[in-house]
Amino acid sequence: MNLHRRGLLIMGAAGPALAAALPASAKVQAVAPPDPTEVVRLWPQGAPGGEGVTVVPIVPERSTDPAYRDRYAQYTTDPIMTVMRPDKPNGSAMLLIPGGGYRWAVLDKEGFDVARVFAASGTTCFILRYRLPADGWTAGADAPLQDAQRAIRLIRSRASEFGVRPDRIAVLGASAGGHLAGLASARTDAAYAPVDVADAASLRPDLSVLMYPVATMADPHVHAGSRTHLLGEGPTPEQIAAYSLEQMGWTGAAPVFLLHAMDDASVPVENSLMLLTTLKAASVKAEAHLFQEGGHGFGIRLIQGRPAQVWPKLARAWAARLNFSL
């Protein structure tokens, strides 16, 4: 065993007290874990409706701490899923759809960070990097939905390759990603024309987890930025109704788990409350957890030591009662 590795093992066994006693030069700095390397392109022949798209993709890094990453993807033109395979698969899959107000999609806080938690308990995770509505795609507001539906179909059609069950595909969406996950859960119509055999598979998830979701596009509880980036300035009443989750038909949808902080100043908790009322009326199995504090966009890392840190455990317990391992 080399001396460097031996030193790391000694530090791990002795705990924080020894680490604190060491001089700064001898301490090992925490480094964010590497990204998974398995990537699946959603549209091998190119995403549909891109003839007028001229944006150039960027993935800026906002974190200055090497212990964690905080990237966002903007102007995506080649949507992908990054696959995070667990050491001991339990047969379930989860498509993670991070938020970003439909302006961009955060990759770490509500993507890789959350995926690592569920992969640790056996769920095969797929982190979605999706297109954005205002980038010139022919489908406009439906461009992100095309990507979400295509991702679900690819996971289901290639279930044996990924080591998952085709009837155990969950979707987890946060903030605006929660809106997109909600659209994928409620909509029964395909937002794009079939491109290959994978599109014969069902496009709806078997379970939905919506974290502090943007649900309504209507005042007074709308997240104005998400509405503007999704529908543009001054959307019509018809557009607002068509993209408000609480105004959609949910009959026959898969079970839904909602979590939200009461002190969310960005996406008011009424978004989840209104959606919950709609789900109950549609006889959709649903469970909601409202935390006294937590703010918005807490994901995993930003909730440690606060009431909402138990949400993954609550989600797993709920899914287990539905015979679904997360």
Image (spheres, helix red, strand yellow):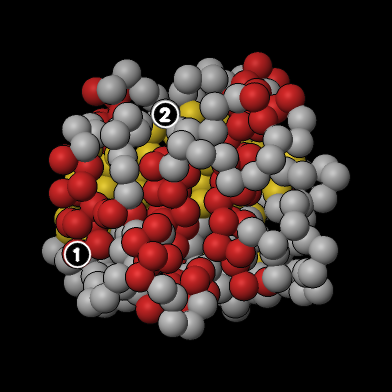
Residue 270's mark? 1
Please tell me how many numbered marks the rendered image carries. Answer: 2
Residue 206's mark? 2
Residue 298's mark? none
Q: Secondary structure at mark 2?
A: loop
Disc with the residue nearer the chain's start (1 vs 2): 2
Q: Residue furthest right?
A: 45
Question: Where's the N terminus, which quadrant?
Answer: top right
- Asked if 207 appears above or below 127 in the picture, the reply is above
Q: Badge 1, how many Cα within 10 Å: few under 14, some, many 20+?
A: some
Look at label 1 and name its amino acid: Glu
- Asked if 113 appears above or below 238 in the picture, the reply is above
Q: Is residue 222 visible?
A: yes
- Asked if 203 appears above or below 229 in the picture, the reply is above
Q: Is residue 234 left or right of residue 263?
A: right
Q: Where in the figure is residue 211, as x and y percent of width and height?
A: 34, 54
Q: Where in the figure is residue 206, as x and y percent of width and height?
A: 42, 29
The one nearer the camera, 278 or 60, is 278
**Residue placed at 77% from the left, 74% from the top?**
55
Look at label 2 and name its amino acid: Asp
Q: Where in the figure is residue 37, as x and y percent of width and height?
A: 75, 44
The one nearer the camera, 287 or 274, is 274
Q: Is residue 255 left or right of residue 79?
A: left
For marks 1 and 2, give the CA distance. Answer: 25 Å
**Residue placed at 27% from the left, 54% from the top?**
246
Q: Is residue 148 left or right of residue 204?
A: right
Q: Badge 2, how many Cα within 10 Å: few under 14, some, many 20+?
A: some
